[in-house]
Image: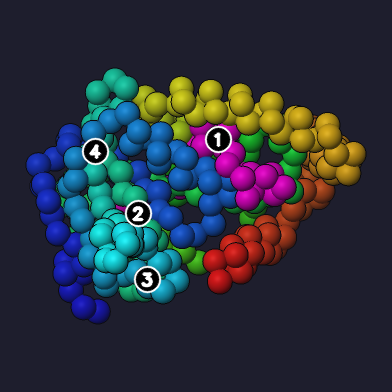
C-alpha cells in the first residue's frame, strides 16, 4: 500500500479538545431522505468551521461520476467549485469542541483512505468516531423513526435494540473505515436512520434530527437541532397533505402501519418476532439499498 499520509495534509494540528469526537458524514453512499446531508448542514450552518485536515480529492474522487460545477460567463470559464473532503473543528451549543469529516465518499483507494483516517485519529487524539447514514425502509412515517446502531465494541451499542442479525449490503468507504478502526483498537460506531422508502427521494429532516439526537447522546454533545425541528414540522404538514390527497398512498401507509404495529407489539410482549416477521428482513433491506443506489445512478447518467 502506498503511504496513507500522502492522501492528506494537516492544516492545523492544534487539538480542538483533549480526546475529541470525530463525526463522519460523507456524500456518495446511500442517504435516504438526505438525512446525513441535512444533519451535516445543521452542524456547519451556524458555526465557523476551522479546517484541520484536507484530503487530496484528486487521488480519491472520480470526477466523471460526480462532475463538479464550472461556471461559464459569455466567452470564458470564470470559476471552478471543486469538491472538498476535509476535517473541520466545530463547537456544540455548549462550546464543547468536536471534529467533523465531510465531503465526497472516495471512489477509489478505500483501504488507503481508511488507513489515512486512522493516522488522523491517532494524531489528533480522537476518542470516538461516529458515522452517519440513512437507509430506506418499508416503514410508515407515522411511527417512531428507527435507527440501526453498530460499533467496534459491544459496549458502544448498549441500550440499543438490534434490528437485524446478519446482512450482506453494498459496501462503503465509511463502513470499511469503521471496520479497520475497530481492528486497530479504536472506538468507532455509526447510526443508520430508517427512512420510509416512499420518502427516500425527498428531504426528510425528521430523520436528520433523529441522527443528531443519537450522536449527541453517544458523544456527550449538545448539537443544534432547532432548524431541523422547524423543517420537520413543515415536512410533516406537507406529507400529511400529500397522503390525504391520494387514496393509493393512504392505503400503502395504512398497510405499513399495520405491519409495524404487529411487529412492535410482538417485540414488546417478548414473543421473539423481529423484523424478519412482518417488516423487511436483512436481505430485503440489502435489496432496498441496492435499488436506491441503482435509481440514483440512473438519474445521474
Residue receiving disc 1: 205
> Would residue 130 be found to the left or right of residue 283 on screen?
left
Q: Is residue 88 left or right of residue 137?
A: left
- Across and down, in percent, residue 141 comes to 71, 36
Instruction: Tell me which label, 4 or 1, sits earlier in the chain.
Output: 4
What separation in Å lies between label 2 and label 3 (alpha carbons)? 13 Å
Horizontal arrangement in the rendering, residue 158 relative to residue 13 (left or right): right
**Cα–Cα span, label 2 and label 4:** 13 Å
Dot 3 or dot 4, earlier in sequence: 4
Q: Find residue 5 and report its image quarter.
A: bottom left
The residue located at (49%, 59%) in the rendering is 29
Question: Label 3 belongs to which residue?
Answer: 63
Please, which residue is most extreme toward the bottom here? 1
SS category of the residue bearing label 3: loop
Q: Earlier in the sequence, mark 2 or mark 3?
A: 3
Residue that carries the numbered disc 2 in the rendered image: 103
For residue 49, the mark is: 4
Q: Which is nearer the N-term, disc 1 or disc 2?
A: 2
Q: Nearer the viewer, residue 256 or 301?
A: 301
Residue range corresponding to the magenta coloring:
182-211
- Mark 1 in CB contact with mark 3 (< 8 angstroms): no
Q: Position of residue 13 (x, y in %)?
A: 10, 47
Label 2: how many Cα within 10 Å (few below 14, some 14–19, many 20+):
many
Distance between the alpha carbons at the discs numbered 1 and 2: 19 Å
Of residues 258 and 29, the one drawn nearer to the viewer in this rendering: 29
Q: Nearer the viewer, mark 2 or mark 3?
A: 3
Amino acid at each position: 500500500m502506498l503511504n496513507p499520509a500522502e492522501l492528506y495534509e494537516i492544516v492545523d494540528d492544534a487539538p480542538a479538545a483533549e480526546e475529541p469526537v470525530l463525526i463522519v458524514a460523507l456524500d456518495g453512499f446511500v442517504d435516504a431522505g438526505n438525512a446525513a446531508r441535512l444533519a451535516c448542514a445543521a452542524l456547519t450552518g451556524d458555526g465557523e468551521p476551522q479546517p484541520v485536515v484536507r484530503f487530496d480529492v484528486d487521488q480519491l474522487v472520480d470526477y466523471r461520476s460526480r462532475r463538479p460545477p464550472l461556471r461559464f460567463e459569455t466567452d470564458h470559464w470564470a470559476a471552478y467549485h471543486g469538491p472538498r473532503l476535509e476535517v473541520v473543528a466545530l463547537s456544540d451549543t455548549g462550546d464543547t469542541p468536536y471534529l467533523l469529516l465531510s465531503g465526497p465518499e472516495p471512489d477509489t483507494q478505500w483501504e488507503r483512505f481508511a488507513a489515512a483516517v486512522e493516522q488522523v485519529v491517532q494524531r489528533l487524539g480522537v476518542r470516538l468516531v461516529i458515522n452517519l447514514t440513512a437507509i430506506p425502509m418499508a416503514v410508515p412515517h407515522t411511527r417512531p423513526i428507527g435507527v440501526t446502531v453498530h460499533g467496534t465494541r459491544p459496549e458502544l451499542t448498549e441500550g440499543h435494540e438490534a434490528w437485524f442479525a446478519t446482512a450482506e449490503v453494498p459496501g462503503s468507504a465509511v463502513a470499511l473505515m469503521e471496520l479497520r478502526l475497530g481492528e486497530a483498537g479504536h472506538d468507532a460506531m455509526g447510526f443508520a436512520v430508517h427512512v420510509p422508502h416512499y420518502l427516500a427521494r425527498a428531504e426528510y429532516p425528521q430523520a436528520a434530527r433523529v441522527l443528531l439526537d443519537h450522536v449527541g447522546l453517544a458523544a456527550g454533545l449538545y448539537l443544534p437541532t432547532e432548524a431541523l425541528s422547524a423543517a420537520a414540522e413543515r415536512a410533516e404538514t406537507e406529507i400529511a397533505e400529500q397522503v390525504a390527497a391520494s387514496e393509493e398512498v393512504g392505503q400503502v401507509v395504512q398497510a405499513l402501519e399495520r405491519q409495524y404495529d404487529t411487529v412492535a407489539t410482538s417485540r414488546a410482549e417478548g414473543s421473539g418476532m423481529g423484523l424478519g416477521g412482518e417488516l423487511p428482513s436483512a436481505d430485503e433491506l440489502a435489496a432496498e439499498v441496492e435499488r436506491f443506489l441503482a435509481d440514483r445512478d440512473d438519474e445521474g447518467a
